[in-house]
Amino acid sequence: MNIEFTELTIRILLLFIPGIITNMLVNKLTERKKENNVYFFIRSFIYGIFSYFLLYIICMFLNWIIPPIIKSVCINQPVIREFKVTFLECLINTKKEFNILEIIYATIIALPLSFIVSYIENKNLINKIAQKLNISNKFGENDVWSYVFSSLPTDVWAIIRDFDKKIIYEGWPSAFSFNYTENELFLENVTVYDLDSNKLYEIDSMYITMEPNKMNIEFRKVEYNDKEG
């Protein structure tokens, strides 16, 4: 019984290599929270199904477009090979042999699929569509911190008031932490002032982190010629 379970597990893992690769790439390309093994395999299962479904669509398209082209070009009618996807059959029937090429093709599809999924997650497209349709007011990020900094235009600069050190930092936020508890910021083209707005110095870049209750962050739109002047 244990041997059969092991064989079944290996069979499922082989078939779902495209889904596992897609999930790993999406985790790499997004700021997704760390997930446990259950959620990892559920996502991998869904991505794997979708990879084979896209492969099925491609095969159906090739079966539809290739035969007429061959018939119009060739005088003698050759035997036209039909493209098939045997994923479900291999999953249900343990005696069915794997089609290695099918797994390879589905794995190739996993790459663009991971880019599409990552783009949807990073841009919070599902939440934005739901907001447009008045379905939900959720913005999709972990907290307001990540939502604000993820949606900042490139011409908006941050002004951080450090009440503990009694200074102000103004600069362009080129990198930021994923959540409010870490509140890490990396600023470029930084100007430092005291709390009376007297200019102290300028520096190319600066890493900032501090306790949330000791700082205040404001934003303003900046023309680049303003900084040059």
Image: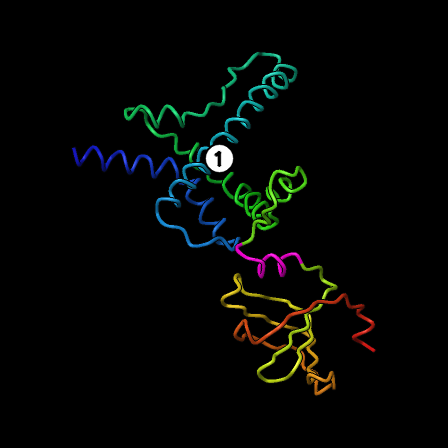
What's the residue at 37%, 42% (across, down)?
41
Q: Give yes or no for residue 149 being in the magenta stretch.
A: yes
Q: Between residue 24 and residue 85, name the one nearer to us.
A: 24
- Which quarter shows the N terminus? top left
Is residue 104 or residue 196 the one in the foreground? Answer: 196
Write down the region rendered in magenta. 142-151
Location of residue 64 with respect to 109 vertically, above or below:
above
Residue 44 coordinates in the image, percent (x, y): 42, 41
- What colour scheme was applied to this rendering of the protein? rainbow
Is disc 1 surrounded by few (<14), some (14 to 19) or many (20+) residues within 10 Å?
many
* Residue 209 in the figure: left or right of residue 42: right
Question: Dot 1 corresponds to which residue?
Answer: 51
Percent x, y of residue 174: 64, 67
Q: Is residue 39 above or below residue 30?
A: above
Q: Position of residue 229 (x, y in %)?
A: 83, 78
Q: What main secondary structure does the magenta stretch of the protein show? A: helix
